[in-house]
Amino acid sequence: MNAPAILYNGGVIYDFADDRTVWERTLPLADAKAVMERMLRHYPGIGAEIYPKGWDVPFLVNRNEVTARHFRVEGFEERPDPVPPEPWNKILFAWEPARLNDITPMLPELMGAAEMEWIRSDDKYLELLPKNSTKGHALDELVRLIGIDPAKSIALGDHLNDLEMLRRAGVGVAVANAHPELRAAASHHGKHHEEHAVADVIAWLEQHLRQGM
């Protein structure tokens, strides 16, 4: 890959070739802390992980079974210092899907007057991101940085954190097992994410280009 990558669900664009961050947004700290405090006060069983700027491992603020599984699957180690450095790229809240579904109607109240983004990145994960830092916003910035026509961009996704990106891409592709809202918004549908979905889209694109010649 020779183009920068979108990370943190749209909060960071990182150039791995040059080993540098080329674009980044961080949470308004006082507002983020207040939202997290309200969340943990109302829902003490929810897991919470903080992702500080420049750190590749999150800080565990509130543990539950879902965060324990997340740390185990990703190979994260809990840090002996529980106080995360500042600023923060995002906060990830983790709980069983049904519990997060119950919280969803309360998100505007939990946010209050703060201006940030709620993103459901997985059935088990709810993320608090800086305002205007979805993957769609990051895609807009990425195509500007590398100087390509946005209409020639292709985005591939499976969950709601990909929705804004699919809407803004020239071609938005939803995998076969994507969230229903993603499938409804997509302009093309691909294979299941475990069935070489990226290779399938590349093959479709190559065929499309050949037919257009």
Image: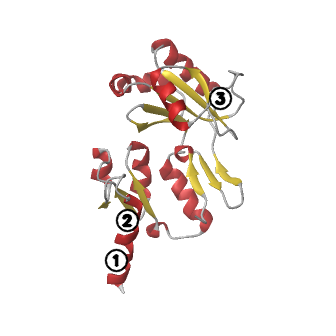
Identify which amino acid the numbered label 1 is placed on: Gln
Foreground residue among 186 and 7: 7
Q: Is mark 1 on a helix, strand or loop?
A: helix
Report, in whole angstroms, how far the alpha carbon at label 3 lies from the one at label 1: 48 Å
Foreground residue among 80 and 190: 80
Residue at image x 33%, y 49%?
182
Residue 116 showing in the rendered view: no
Q: Which mark is residue 103?
A: none
Direction from residue 171 to residue 26 in the image, left or right: right
What crowding class fits label 3: few (fewer than 14 Cα within 10 Å), some (14-19), or many (20 or more)? some
Where is residue 34? Give x, y as percent. Answer: 58, 21
Foreground residue among 131 and 174: 174
Circle 3 or circle 1, nearest the eye: 1
Q: Mark 1 points at which residue?
A: 207
Identify which amino acid the numbered label 3 is placed on: Leu
Q: Residue 201 carries which label?
A: 2
Where is residue 25? Give x, y as percent. Answer: 63, 43
Residue at image x 45%, y 26%?
66
Direction from residue 195 to residue 162 in the image, left or right: right
Residue at image x 50%, y 35%?
73
Direction from residue 127 to residue 100 in the image, left or right: left
Instruction: Say which quadrant the C terminus sits in.
Output: bottom left
Q: Which mark is residue 29?
A: 3
Residue 162 showing in the rendered view: yes
Residue at image x 48%, y 66%?
150
Q: Is mark 3 on a helix, strand or loop?
A: helix
Q: What element carries label 2?
A: helix
Direction from residue 83 to residue 111 in the image, left or right: left
Chosen colour scheme: secondary structure
